[in-house]
Image: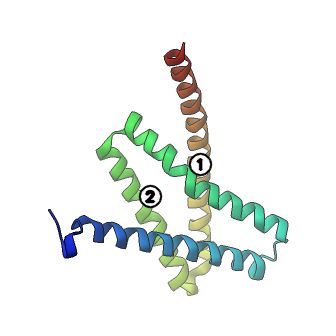
Amino acid sequence: MSGFRGHPSGLYALFATEFWERYGFYSLAAILTLYMDEHLKFSQQLSGQVYGGYIAGVYFMPLIGGFLADRVLGYNRSVMIGAVLLLEAVLRGHYVRTLGGIAAILAVISAILLIVHLWLWVIAIILAALALFLMVQKLRELWS
């Protein structure tokens, strides 16, 4: 099925999705760098380390998430978990930006959610190490 000028009709949705994803990525990277420099007064070395961790997370977490979705969770559970985490992050971001009058309460809620997120990162790292171990074992079986 072809759309405008012989291109597949899904190509435009793919282009728009990729365009806005890249826009969001580079915008957040710039905002993160500016925030660390201007507000948190991080040194250039520490800012570089945090920025590198952000970049690594952006590129490697989809691999881990894809592995978990394919091998452990399944399609429906993966979509539901992803939707809940995305909704939580978006709502927390909107609350922090728009409700400055109750910043102390939101800071406590945000800190609690941050702790939950950190534990999810720890679990994700452990699962990633386990997945890497299992993949190496499987490759050894296949190659031997």
- The disc at residue 111 is none
2 or 1: tag closer to the N-terminus: 2
Q: Position of residue 57 (x, y in %)?
A: 60, 55
Label drawn at residue 121: 1
Q: Looking at the picture, how far across and down is residue 22, in whole percent?
A: 49, 70
* Residue 65 in the figure: left or right of residue 29: left
The residue lying furthest to the top in this view is 144
Proximity of marks 2 and 1: CB atoms separated by less than 8 Å: no
* Residue located at (41% from left, 65% from top): 87
Q: Secondary structure at mark 1?
A: helix
Query: Residue at the spot x=59%, y=48% of the render?
Result: 121
Hey, which residue is sitting farthest front in the picture? 6
Q: Nearer the viewer, residue 25 or 124?
A: 25
Q: CA distance from mark 2 to mark 1?
A: 13 Å
Please determine whether, in this image, residue 5 is positioned above or below residue 11.
below
Q: Is residue 141 left or right of residue 81?
A: right
Q: Which mark, by number, is residue 85?
A: 2
Front-lying residue, 136 or 115: 136
Q: Residue at x 25, y 65 (%)?
A: 10
Q: Quadrant of residue 15?
A: bottom left
Amino acid found under the numbered disc labelled 1 = Trp
**In this view of the protein, which residue sits in the foreground, 65 or 142?**
142
> On the rendered structure, is 87 left or right of 112?
left
Disc 2 residue type (three-letter): Leu
Residue found 76% across the figure and 60% down from its top? 49
